[in-house]
Each structure stands twice: as structure tokens, then as C-alpha cells.
Image (cartoon, rainbow, N blue to C red):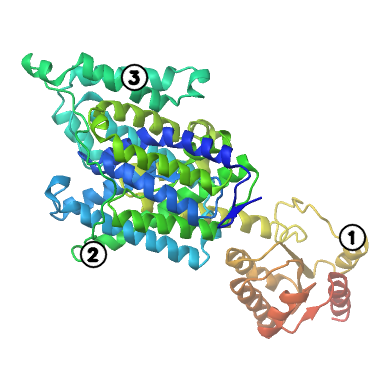
Amino acid sequence: MAFINGFHLRNIRGDVLGGLTAAVVALPLALAFGEAALGDGGAIYGLYGAVIVGFLAALFGGTPAQVSGPTGPMSVTVAGVIASLAAVGVSPDLGAGEILPMVMAAVVLGGLFQILFGLLKLGKYITLVPYSVVSGFMSGIGVIIITLQLGPLLGITTGGGVIESVNRLINNFEPNTAAISVSIMTLAIVFLTPRKISQWIPSPLLALLIVTPLSVFLFNDAGLIEKGVTPIPRIGQIPEGGLTFSIPNLQDNLPLIIQAGLVLAVLGAIDSLLTSLVADNISQTRHNSDRELIGQGIGNSVAGLFNGLPGAGATMRTVINVKSGGSTPISGMVHSIVLLLVLLGAGSLAAEIPKALLAGILIKVGLDIIDWGFLRRAHRLSLKTAAVMYGVLLMTVLWDLISAVLVGVFIANMLTIDSITQTQLEGMDADNPLADPTGSDFCDSPIPADEQALLDQCSGEAMLFRLRGPMSFGAAKGISERMMLVRNYKVLILDITDVPRLGVTATLAIEEMVEEAKANSRVALVAGASGKVKDRLARFGIECIRATRKEALEEASKLIKST
């Protein structure tokens, strides 16, 4: 068995085949994402990004079979960066040479942020995002991609964000019949190609190979001009000769560029690590989240130095790579080498690709990104979950990507904390008629008969509160709300036998409850504390700790009988 930098060569045939197949899928997508992100003339930068990010993320990353490159979320984010820069007076025209160095500065910073995330070992936290947020975000990305491609699909020039693009589409609604014909052919191929064929030739590549020459033959630009018909918008000549180093512009609009870099870093991290989870499932491996972030960061920061579109782990390309035999980082590197060879020799051929064709491919990508299954059944699973998911979707489309995720995570976590708190406190009222006026017994673990007998001997003068599970700050409110009940009893017993962890805020609430009992000439006992929970209570100066609930009940019975 031979090794190269830790990459075993025993599966070299499968890795080469997987990388080659992934490259075939990546080619039309890289061109399409470049055009979608950067507008006219941007297709080549998508290919640059696929070559650089794909190679370096595979070489330095932590997910063996993952294939990286430009993705929907990253291209949408870059388009948003351009819109933000245009809003402060920067010309969005790539030909002017002003916008690209600033965008690439954001790409470089985004890569450096990702490296920092990895060094700080934040990988395990980035994927702790509720599914409702991820689903709403990804569906929102899908809606954005579809909306932005409606103009190119009809041969109408649009640009900017979702609202601006729709406004331009409505105000300049003059569809190009030739472009529509190309779009129909493309959509027919990407949606209707039989699975037996698409397994060998991916439908996006098939559309590229069939529709491009047909568009040249059927809709010759010179012939259309003679007939007074507007020619089909095409990618145009792309530069050949490989990658060229370029210095990003970190001087102008630096605050905006830093913000954009952070957005790219966070979204790229989420996108990549979610794909890593998919790769783990289908390849039966386990990725290294922090190393993956470092690899993605190196790829993106270097891509920005060569005018490459930023990338992330690409789910579809990764799945195809694994199913085609790829299992090590070599497959991702082969994928990039194949794309580099295409870049060096196929510039003139790519120039004839219609933009409507790329729009058709992206429409299919957008529809695939939308989480249709969860959209259809979210409201049946949980109204709260559905509200979070739809809220994130709308915020993603109409407001801001990163803000949508942050707000969604905050709200989802607050709802989760509320639900956990209710579970933690649900046993507190079950043993006390005054605390539970309905008399309902929803405690799923009644106390033993001998302990119940001791509680009965107290003749309703003792109050038993039982807490369960880790007590976070959310439980503090429930504990505090019950403090007024202390005055109705002579003895308060707070049973924390089933509490493995006690947060500071919850400990303060217990301390306050004990002090409230003392202030009203009542006796407060804390039962069942052990280990770290007991140590924490001791550090707070809470002395009325009893080893077991039974011991506390026996003491309570004696105290009540003696008074």
C-alpha cells in the first residue's frame, strides 16, 4: 500500500473515475454560477473557483471524498456583495475593472475567517443549527436562484437582488424568442433525461453538449441581425492560458468588505459541513470539521488571489463522486485537474454557450435546493417549526442571508429552551395540591410508597418540588414563579436527585427560594444533590442539603409534628 501525504493509492482507479465524473458535472455548474454571481463575463471566474477551491479543499480538508467548488448559496452571496458595493457607488460592470478586486478582497477575507474558525475549533458548533432554519435557508436560496434566472431564461437582461431583478424583468419585459427556444430545450433535457442516460452523462452536461451547437446552427447571430431579431445573449469569449494572480482591493469600502467576508465565511462553513455530513452517510466515513474549515479557507483565500469565485462542499458533486468510486481526497484533486485542462483549451468553445442555457440549468439547481418535502409537511409536524422555517425562507429571499440564519437560530433556540424548561419543571407541581389546582397528576415517576407515607404524615404542611434534567437559565423563571407558594407551607423540600447539571442562573433561583422560605419563618431543605451539583450549591453558601429525598421527608415530618 502506497501513501502520498496520507492519501492511500489502493483506490486510485475509483478516485480517478470519481474525479472525472465530478468534473463533468461541475463544468456547466461552475460556468452557470460564475455568470449568476458576477453577471456578464463572470462565467470564467466560476471555473477559476472550481479549479482552485476544488484542489486545495481536497488537499487540506477533512472530508475525504468531498468535492468542493462554487455553490448556490455562495454565488447568491457574491451577487449580494456586488449589489451592496453598487449601492455605495461602485460600478458593477466587470469590464470597468473596479468591482472585481473588491469582491475578491471579500473572498480572501472569507477564506481567512474560515481558517480562523478551524483553528479555534468552531466546526462542531457551526452545524448545531436547527433543521427548520437550515431548511428555510436552503429553500430561500433556491427561490433566489430561480428568481434571478427568470430574466436570462427569457433573454432579458436583469441584475441586482431579488426585488431589483423582478422590477427590471417587469419594466423591460421584451422576451427573446430565440432565447426562449434555447431555454425550453435546456429545461426539457435537464428534467426529462431518463435516469439510465443521466447515470452516464449528467443532464446539465448533456444540455450543454446538445443545446450549444443547436443554438449556433438554428440561431446564427448574423442571421438574426439580418432579420432584425436580437441575437441570443451568450457568454462570449473567455480568456485562455490559465490562472492569473491579481491583488485584491482591501483599501476601498473596507468595513463593507469585511462584513461580506464574514458572511461568505459563515455560509461557506455551514454549506461545507452540511455536505460533509452527507458524505459521511454515503461513504461510511467520519469527517474532521475543523480541518475541513481550514481546507475550505485555504481554497477560498487562494481563489480570491486568482479571481476565483468562492466555493464550498458541493453536495451533488460529492454524491456523484462517491457513487462513481471516489473515496479519498485524490478524487477531488483529479476533478480540479480535469477542469484546469478544460480551462486551458476550451475557451473559444465555451464562448458560444447561451446564457439562457445556463439559466435553465440553474433553474433545475434552484428547484433541487428547495426542501419540498419539509415545506409540504412542516405545518403538520409543528406550527412553531413551520413558522420558523417559513420566516427564515422569507428573510433569506427579501432581507439578508446571514441575518436570516442568525434570527432563525435565535428564535428556534428560544422555542427549544422554552420547551425544555416546561419538561424540566413539569414535575414540580405534581405532588402539591395547592401548586396544582386542577389536581391532575402528570408526574410520570411517583415517589415510593414509604416516602409518600412520610409526605402524607406532614398533613399538607410540607411542599415537595421535584426537578428533572439539566437545569439551565430557562428553568430559573419557573422556580422563581413558585416562590410565593412557600408561604402556604411550613417546610419546603426541593428534590434535585434527577438533576445532573445546575446552571448559575438556576442555582441563584434556588438560593432565592431558600432565602424566601427563611424570610417567612419556614424551613427549606434541598435533597439529593451530589457531585458537581452539590459542589455548586456549597459554593453559593446553600447549607440545607440532605443526601436523599427520604431523609428530607423524615426531617420534615419530625419538624411538623414538633410544632
* Image position of 429 with respect to 46: above or below: below
* Image position of 559 with respect to 400: above or below: below
Residue 440 image position (x, y, % from top left) = 74, 50
How far is disc 3 from disc 2 in space, using C-alphas?
43 Å
Q: Nearer the viewer, mark 3 or mark 2?
A: 3
Residue 31 image position (x, y, % from top left) = 31, 37
Mark 1 residue type: Pro
In the displayed structure, does residue 363 sit left or right of residue 173? right
In the displayed structure, does residue 476 sit left or right of residue 259? right
Camera-side residue of 56 and 231: 56
Residue 286 image position (x, y, % from top left) = 62, 51
Q: Of label 3 and label 2, which has the lower sequence position?
A: 3
The local secondary structure at tag 3 comes to helix
Q: Nearer the viewer, mark 1 or mark 3?
A: 3
Camera-side residue of 95 and 533: 95
Mark 2 residue type: Leu
Camera-side residue of 134 and 407: 134
* Residue of label 1: 448
Q: Of label 1 and label 3, which has the lower sequence position?
A: 3
In the displayed structure, does residue 361 sit left or right of residue 539? left
The local secondary structure at tag 2 comes to loop
* Residue of label 2: 250
